[in-house]
Amino acid sequence: MAKGKAKATVRKPARKTTPRAKKGLAYTAPPQPRGERANDAPLPEMGLCASAGGLEAFTKLLQHLPADTGMAFVLVQHLDPKHESILASLLSRATKMTVREAANQTRVEPNHVYVMPPNSNMTIVDSMLRLTRRLDTRAAHMPIDHFFHSLAGTQKDKAVGVILSGTASDGTAGLRAIKSEGGITFAQDQSSARYDGMPRNAISAHVVDFILTPEEIAKELVNISRHPYVISKAAERAAELLVAGKSEFGKIFGLLRARTGSDFSAYKRGTIERRVRYLASALR
C-alpha cells in the first residue's frame, strides 16, 4: 500500500487504491531469504479467480511470479461443466511452479498452483482442497464466492483474494468475507481487463485493497510472501497493546481525523489489527 496521505482512487499507471483503502498503514517488508517464511508460519494460501478473459490474466500474473514465493495459489474460473479443461496444461507453460488440476482431498503445497476442475465447487479447509459436484440448478453458479468464503474461514487475516477479468458479480461477496477477517484483497485494474464486470463490481462494493494490473498484482504478492506473517511473540504483544480496547481505538482515530482529515472508523477491527501488526513487525 502506497505511502502518503489517503486519497480517492485515480486512474493512472501507478498503484491505485480504492477510496476506503487508506495509504500509509502498511509497509514494504524487508528482504527475507527467498522461499522462506517466518518460523512456524502457516502456509500462505490465496485464491486467484476469474471468468471470461481469465486465461490471459492468469498467464500474465503467473509469468511475473517467481517460483519460490512459498505460497500456494488456487485458481477458480467459470468453466463449461460439460467440457474437459486444459487450463492447467496451458498455465504450466507460464510458470516454473507445479501446476495441477485439483482433486478432492488434495493437500496444498508451497510453490504449487491448483486449478479447479469443471463441473465442480471447491472449498479449502485446513490446507485441504475439497471438491463437490456442481448442483444442477437454475440459480447462478458462484464458485468464486463459494471458495473465497472457505478461504476466509480457514486463513482468517492471512487470506488473500484476487479478482481478475470476468463478467457479472461473482467474487464480490467472497472478497467481503476476506476483508471482514482482516485479509488482503485485490482486483484487476479495469483498463487492463478483457472483461471488467467482476473487478468493477468488487471495486464498487468497496471490498478491494489494491487495484492493479496482473503484473503489478504479482509484484505485490511477492512483497506479501517476503513479509513475516507470523511475527515474533514480542512484536505480537506490542501489536496487541497498540490495538487493545475500543476507547484506545477511538482516541487514535480522533487524532488521525484531526491531523489528516481521514476517518478510519469505518474499517473492520480485523483489518486495523492486521495492519498494526505490519507496523509492529517493522519496528522490531
Image (spheres, rainbow, N blue to C red):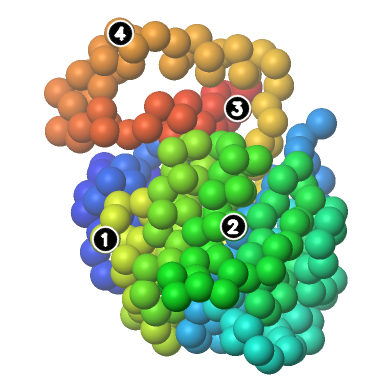
| Closer to the eye: label 2 or 3 | 2
Q: Earlier in the sequence, mark 4 or mark 2?
A: 2
Q: Which residue is tagged 1?
A: 204
Q: Earlier in the sequence, mark 1 or mark 3?
A: 1
Callout 1: helix, strand or loop?
Answer: helix
Residue 189 seen in render? no
Give, as a three-letter code, the residue at label 1. Answer: Ser
Residue 191 seen in render? yes
Residue located at (75% from left, 81% from top): 88
| Closer to the eye: label 1 or 3 | 1
CB within 8 Å, label 3 to label 4: no
Q: Which residue is tagged 3?
A: 281
CB within 8 Å, label 4 to label 2: no
The CA span between labels 1 and 2 is 21 Å
The CA span between labels 2 and 3 is 30 Å
Callout 2: helix, strand or loop?
Answer: helix
Q: Which residue is tagged 2?
A: 147
Residue located at (66% from left, 77% from top): 119
The quadrant where residue 218 appears:
bottom right
Q: Earlier in the sequence, mark 3 or mark 4?
A: 4
| Closer to the eye: label 4 or 2 | 2
